[in-house]
Image (cartoon, grey):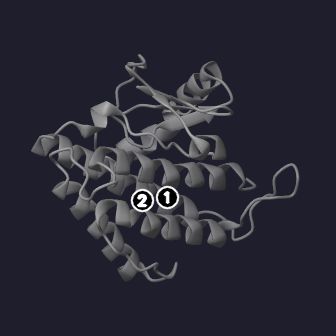
Amino acid sequence: MAIETGTKRVFASVLDWPGWCRAGKTEPLALEALAAYRDRYAAVAEAALVPFPKRVDLTVIERLRGDATTDYGAPSAAAKLESRPMTRAEMDRMCALVAAAWTVFDRVVNGAPAELRKGPRGGGRDRDKIVDHVLAAECGYAPKLRLRLKEPARDDRAAIRANRAALLDAFRKGGDGKPLREGGWSARYAARRIVWHAMDHAWEIEDRTDR
């Protein structure tokens, strides 16, 4: 597990399970949030058909220095372990988890109302705006993997599938652990960042849906 510490926010990320990542104002609060989301993240592993253990080792093996992006609310630092080459089996597992996160995200979106419950101060995007934001962000991440993707309309399933397939293909080209372009992201870090973003908003939608 990696701990990324900014001046205002701390992220705890389980590196072997891309997207199982939560934040808090302090390290203890980030770790508490991470543990609390274990069962919610298990849905991704289930969709990927990847066995999810009842107990996961949450030992901190790497500490990362955060930056303004960390404080703004997104994990920003790649761990050294994310530059390791991947075996074929490791790559297949990682890509399965990324694809499963998209499946879970889509399922949550399809089961949510268009208008979501507002936050304590009346803020927060509604469902369709969240979907637009996630799709746009993934196109924004693409250049880090030497890709150019056009933002799809939220109801253009073929275009969404094509973009996701392109991202998965880019991951597979980064199996040696090296970024696909200078200043870009390694496949492992890109997967962690993309799944974190999709699941963070999937969980937001769940939390803001009136039951």
Residue found at the far front of this picture: 182
Residue 194's place in the image compared with 166, above or below, is: above
Check the image and report above or below for 60 versus 143. above
Residue at 65% x, 46% y: name it.
72
Left or right placement of residue 123 versus residue 107 in this view: right
Q: Amino acid at mark 2?
A: Trp
Q: Is residue 33 left or right of residue 49?
A: right
Q: How many marks?
A: 2
Q: Look at label 1 and name its amino acid.
A: Phe
Q: Is residue 51 visible?
A: no
Q: Which residue is mark 2?
A: 102
For residue 47, above or below residue 117? above
36 displayed left or right of 79: right
Between 94 and 147, the one lying in front of the other is: 147
Q: Callout 2: helix, strand or loop? A: helix
On the image, the x and y values in percent for residue 166 come to: 27, 69
Pointers 2 and 1 in contact (C-beta within 8 Å): yes
In the rendered image, which residue does mark 1 sit on?
A: 105
Quadrant for residue 67, please give it.
Answer: top right
Residue 77 on image: x %, y %: 45, 39
Image coordinates of residue 175 in percent, x first then y, are: 17, 48
Question: How many C-alpha atoms fall within 10 Å of the one at disc 2: few (<14), some, or many (≥20)?
Answer: many
In this view, the residue farthest toward the left is 88
Quadrant the N terminus occupies:
top left
